[in-house]
Structure formats: structure tokens, C-alpha cells
Image (cartoon, rainbow, N blue to C red):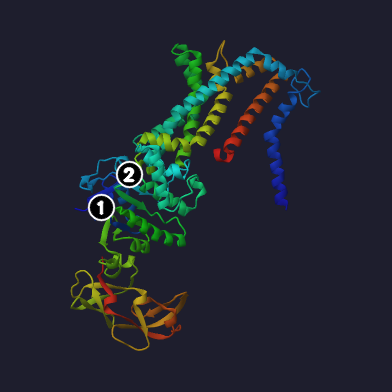
């Protein structure tokens, strides 16, 4: 009995720590007071109105969205073939490729960002936009490879062999048999890479500049100068958008299958 | 010339480390041949090499007079039925069966006709719209068979197709498989570790051990005249005693065991003074009250009820514990009784002891 009480107490503490901050942000975003405060005073939607009418937020939101979608798509385009080869074939140097694809996770992102800044921007090889995209793709690629190769590994190889014995070429097997059966993995990889890119600060910090910036960077900069609830309103909006996406996916696919 | 010929085939997963060594096998057109053996004996490896999933490192695979070694698996026109069915999970039954026909670019109406005919053949008409996940194991395996045969392959390979089914269904499917194979007249190579399955399905059975064929023979011959100790053990003979050959006469040998001796059928080349192992089936022993020719004295240790049969465990001095099986109606013997075990010389086989 006392064990049960202990479990509930721990559970409650965990929930408070996990969800508590979100509830505070959520509540604070409706506050009438001029500074970010909790408990909120009164109720107003003015901070939401302010946020969605500020060009710098809107522009950086668009940039973030654009970078996150393109980086995720690029990561899938590169990641699916890499994941397939890693999951299905043995070749000399396979370990090396595996380590290479996890490197972006191991190297501190600050270092990666600095390297990209030095090479591509200072030497003027690519534009800021392109470099930002390259940096984000590199950061999210390992996630795509990992998730997709695990869903390929879960797909019995004998099914591919069955298709081969029926006369299908390797390419046809991949397109007609493998791809349709790893869509769940591909979609969950896309969601994870999208969110990772959208939230990224360290890489973006080096690769944004005047005229182009991502939303997290703009939010950070904004907070350095202002301390009003508009930042809480923005955070609330982002949480709601993410929650909406996840709920829709759950409805469509079943989250248990995804993760 | 046989339809399928394996000539000195060696296959392995690493260089110079062969799982299948120098294997030679002939399968006639329309024949049903099983590869039988314990796990790890190389039977599945052999099958996968025939299918082209594994590279042959030495030797030749010849089908219909043509060397197949370097033909890629998707150009071989060989049907393969897997243990785990390997149906395409995202396609329904109809689309699964139609897969190979679509690749062969048959017109739509021909595909439809062929698929429905194949489903009829395996007894699954009316299941076209179901997904594999909505079928039982037995039904899934039928779909897999329909999918393999609908393209009219030159050769059908099956890798333990029944071993994921429950015992009752397995026996039912055996008869079904036999019917389908005979009706289609399709040359079939079947892999299994279940000797009853191999013996009941096949025209000929190749018993494999450590990458080699021990004996390739009809089920009757394997069952009655195993050529090696390994095959004898695999088809239900039990080792019971070792002894020395003291006399050879008309294929029968007399083997001295301690203070007594037994007559047995000599397998392989035996010579006087050779150390041999005697094997017999538990049901070929007779339990007698009195001493008789070719019998051993022992004490019944336990009596185990097995339904139709009773299993006795008999302790024989100098020999050890022997299993004796007999129909329940004859099993009047009790535990602790002193009895004599008689075995006819032709039911008792003598093999040279391997070192």
C-alpha cells in the first residue's frame, strides 16, 4: 500500500516538473500586466494580437518553417537510401559510414555552426540561406537515418526476397515493397527532424544575420530587450501548433506505431 | 539428365568457410524432393543457393541443362515459399498473388483470371480483398503458395513452410501440399527438420548433416535401410549398445556384448573385431518372460502411459537403459519385473563406431 502511495507521489512530482512550466507560460500569456508574471493578472488576448502582427516574428517564423521543411525533406532524400544500405548490406567501411552519420550528434553544434560559418559564409561560397539549410540538414540527418533504418530492420528481409523471386528488380522492390511499408517510419522521421530543425538555436545562431533569422533566434533576441508576455503568447502558439500536428498524426497513424 | 542438378556445390557466408560442402543432388522433372536435417545442417543454405539468394562459391547449379550460377535471383523464374509466409503486408490477397504477374506485364484481365484460378486452387476464393494481417497462419501460407505458383515457375522451393502452423493444421496442410504438387506436376525442393513431414510428402528425401548429404533415397528405403548411423538416428532408431563383431554370415553379424551376444544386420562394410553400435526402434523390441534367441535380460524400471502406446524403460546390465514401446493392449508388464528383450536380427542394425 505504501509502495502505491510512493508511486503516486513520484508520478505527481514528475508531472509537475514536466508540465508545470508549460502551464505557467500558458497562463502568463493571457496576463494583462506589462511584464511576464505568474500568477497572471486579469485576462487579455492583446499579446497574441501583438505577436501575430509583428513583422519580425512573422518573417522569422516563415524562415524557420521554410528551413525546417526543406531540411527535413533533404534529410529524408539523403537518409532513406543511406538507411536502406546500412540496414540491408554488409560492405567494407560500413562502421565508418555509420559513425559518419552520427557525427553531427556527437560534435557540439556550436562547433559545427562555427565551422559552417567560416567555410561557407566568410569564404562566400554559399548564401546565408543555403548555408542555414545545409547546417540544419546535417543536424537532422542522423535522426532520419536512425529512425528509418530501424523501421527497415523491422521489415522482414524475406518479404523483399519474395518480391525478388517473383521477378522484381532491386529498384522495383525498394519502390513497390519497401517504401510503402516504412511510411510510418518516414513520417515520424519527418516530424522529428522538422521539430529538431524548427527549435534549433546553436547552429542558427552562427548562420543567421541581418535580414534573415529563425524564430528561436528572434525570440532570444527579443527577450534580451523586452520582458512582456508576448514571448509567452508566442510560446503558447508554438506549443499549440506542435500539439495539433502530433494529434493529427496520432489520429492518422497511431502514435504507438510511430515511436 | 535430371531437371535440377547440383554439381559439387559449396556455399558459405565467409570465404573458404563452407556451410554446404561439395554437394551433389539430382532432382527429376515433377519430382518432390525434401532436404531433411537438424538446424545448421545447411539445408536452407542449399535452398537459398538454388534460389540465387546466396552465391555459389564452387560447383554448378544446372536447371534444365542450363548453368544458373550467375543468373540473378529475379531472372531465375523460381518460386519460393518462406517459413514466415513473407506476404506483402500493404497489399491485399489479390494484389499479393498478382504481384509476379504484374511484373511479367500480363494484361489486366489475364491477371484477374489467373489470380482467381490460383486462389481457387489453394481454396481461398472470396478472400481477395483481405489484408494478410486479417488471415490465419494457414491461410497466409496458402496465399504465399498461390503467389509462388501463379507465375508458373520452373521450380518451386519451400523453406519449412509448415513449421509456423499448429500441429493439427500442419498435418492437414501436408496432404494439401502433396495434392497441389502432384496436380501441378511442379518440380519441388522442400526443406524441413521434421522427418515425418519429409517422409510423408516426398518422392525422395536427402538427409543432410554438416553440409553434406548422408543419404538420398525414397522414404521407404530411408525408413527401413538407413545407410549411416546419423540417418538411422534421424528416422527413429535408438542407439542401445556397443559391441565387437565376432562373426559375419550372409549380411548378419554376431556382436559380442559383455557376456552375451546379439545378431544384427550389418550396415556398411564391417569386419571381424570391429567396434560397432547397435540401433533399433523402440517398437521393435518384444518383451518376453523367458530367455529366447537374440534377447537381453533386464529389469523394467518404469512404465509410461502414452495413449495408444505404453513406453517401458528397461535397465539392462552392461547396456544401460532401453526404451521399448508397445501397443497398450499388450502392455501387461509391471515395474520391477525381470524380463527378456527380444529383437529380430533384421530390425537391429549394426554400424561401425565413429571415432
**Which residue sits at x=48%, y=17%?**
A131
Disc 2 with disc 1 on a shared chain:
yes
Question: What is the distance, in whole Å, between disc 2 and disc 1 at their CAs?
Answer: 17 Å
Instruction: Confirm or deny contact between disc 2 and disc 1 (CB under 8 A).
Output: no
To which residue does mark 2 refer? B53
Disc 1 crowd rating (10 Å Cα; few below 14, some 14-19, many 20+) is many
On screen, residue A253 versus residue A156, left or right, reads right
Rendered view: B156 above or below A126:
below
Looking at the rendered structure, the number of numbered marks drawn on it comes to: 2
What chain is tagged by disc 1? B
Q: Which of the pair B35/B261 is nearer the observer?
A: B35
Q: Position of residue B45 (x, y in %)?
A: 32, 50
On screen, residue A1 versus residue B46, left or right, reads right
Rendered view: B59 above or below B290:
above
Q: Which of the pair B12/B144 is nearer the observer?
A: B144
Q: Position of residue B190 (x, y in %)?
A: 33, 55
On screen, residue B143 versus residue A25, left or right, reads left
Residue A30 is drawn in which quadrant? top right
Residue B21 circle label: 1
Q: Which of the pair A32/A176 is nearer the observer?
A: A176
Rendered view: B228 above or below A213:
below
**Which residue sits at x=42%, y=36%?**
A176
Amino acid at each position: 500500500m505504501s509502495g502505491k502511495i510512493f508511486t503516486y507521489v513520484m508520478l505527481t512530482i514528475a508531472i509537475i516538473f514536466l508540465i508545470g512550466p508549460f502551464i505557467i507560460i500558458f497562463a502568463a500569456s493571457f496576463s494583462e500586466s506589462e511584464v511576464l508574471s505568474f500568477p497572471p493578472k486579469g485576462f487579455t488576448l492583446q499579446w497574441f494580437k501583438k505577436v501575430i502582427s509583428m513583422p519580425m516574428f512573422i518573417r522569422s517564423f516563415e524562415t524557420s518553417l521554410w528551413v525546417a521543411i526543406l531540411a527535413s525533406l533533404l534529410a529524408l532524400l539523403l537518409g532513406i537510401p543511406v538507411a536502406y544500405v546500412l540496414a540491408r548490406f554488409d560492405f567494407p567501411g560500413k562502421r565508418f559510414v555509420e559513425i559518419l552519420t552520427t557525427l553531427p550528434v556527437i560534435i557540439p553544434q556550436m562547433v559545427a555552426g562555427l565551422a559552417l560559418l567560416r567555410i561557407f559564409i566568410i569564404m562566400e561560397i554559399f548564401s546565408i540561406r543555403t548555408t542555414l539549410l545545409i547546417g540544419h540538414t546535417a543536424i537532422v540527418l542522423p535522426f532520419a537515418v536512425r529512425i528509418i533504418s530501424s523501421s527497415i530492420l523491422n521489415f522482414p528481409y524475406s518479404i523483399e526476397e519474395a518480391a525478388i523471386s517473383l521477378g522484381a528488380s532491386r529498384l522495383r522492390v525498394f519502390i513497390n515493397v519497401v517504401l510503402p511499408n516504412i511510411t510510418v517510419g518516414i513520417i515520424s522521421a519527418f516530424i522529428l527532424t522538422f521539430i529538431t530543425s524548427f527549435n534549433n538555436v546553436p547552429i542558427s545562431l552562427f548562420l543567421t544575420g541581418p535580414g534573415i533569422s529563425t524564430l528561436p533566434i528572434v525570440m532570444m533576441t527579443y527577450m534580451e530587450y523586452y520582458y512582456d508576455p508576448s514571448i509567452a503568447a508566442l510560446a503558447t502558439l508554438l506549443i499549440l501548433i506542435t500539439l495539433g500536428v502530433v494529434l493529427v498524426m496520432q489520429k492518422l497513424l497511431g502514435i504507438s506505431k510511430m515511436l | 539428365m535430371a531437371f535440377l542438378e547440383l554439381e559439387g556445390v559449396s556455399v558459405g557466408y565467409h570465404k573458404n568457410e563452407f556451410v554446404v560442402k561439395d554437394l551433389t543432388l539430382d532432382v527429376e522433372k515433377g519430382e518432390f524432393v525434401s532436404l531433411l536435417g537438424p538446424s545448421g545442417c545447411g539445408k536452407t543454405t542449399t535452398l537459398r543457393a538454388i534460389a540465387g539468394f546466396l552465391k555459389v562459391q564452387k560447383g554448378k547449379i544446372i536447371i534444365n541443362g542450363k548453368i544458373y550460377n550467375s543468373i540473378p535471383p529475379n531472372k531465375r523464374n523460381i518460386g519460393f515459399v518462406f517459413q514466415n509466409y513473407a506476404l506483402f503486408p500493404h497489399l491485399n490477397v489479390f494484389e499479393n498473388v498478382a504481384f509476379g504477374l504484374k511484373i511479367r506485364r500480363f494484361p489486366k484481365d489475364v491477371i484477374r483470371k489467373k489470380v482467381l484460378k490460383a486462389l481457387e486452387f489453394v481454396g481461398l476464393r472470396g478472400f481477395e480483398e483481405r489484408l494478410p494481417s486479417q488471415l490465419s497462419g494457414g491461410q497466409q501460407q496458402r496465399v504465399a503458395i498461390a503467389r509462388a505458383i501463379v507465375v508458373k515457375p520452373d521450380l518451386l522451393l519451400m523453406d519449412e513452410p509448415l513449421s509456423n502452423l499448429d500441429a493439427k493444421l500442419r498435418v492437414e496442410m501436408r496432404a494439401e501440399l502433396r495434392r497441389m504438387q502432384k496436380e501441378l506436376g511442379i518440380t519441388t525442393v522442400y526443406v524441413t527438420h521434421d522427418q515425418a513431414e519429409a517422409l510423408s510428402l516426398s518422392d525422395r528425401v536427402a538427409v543432410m548433416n554438416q553440409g553434406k548429404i548422408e543419404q538420398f533415397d525414397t522414404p521407404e528405403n530411408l525408413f527401413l535401410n538407413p545407410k549411416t548411423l546419423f540417418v538411422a538416428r534421424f528416422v527413429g532408431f535408438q542407439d542401445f549398445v556397443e559391441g565387437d563383431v565376432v562373426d559375419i554370415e550372409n549380411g548378419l553379424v554376431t556382436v559380442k556384448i559383455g557376456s552375451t551376444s546379439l545378431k544384427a544386420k550389418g550396415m556398411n562394410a564391417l569386419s571381424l573385431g570391429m567396434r560397432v553400435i547397435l540401433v533399433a526402434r523402440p517398437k521393435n523390441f518384444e518383451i518376453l518372460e523367458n530367455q529366447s534367441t537374440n534377447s537381453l535380460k533386464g529389469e523394467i524400471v518404469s512404465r509410461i502411459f502414452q495413449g495408444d502406446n505404453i513406453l517401458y524403460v528397461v535397465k539392462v546390465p552392461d547396456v544401460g537403459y532401453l526404451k521399448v514401446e508397445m501397443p497398450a493392449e499388450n502392455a501387461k508388464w509391471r515395474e520391477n519385473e525381470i524380463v527378456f528383450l527380444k529383437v529380430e536380427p533384421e530390425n537391429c542394425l549394426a554400424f561401425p563406431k565413429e571415432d
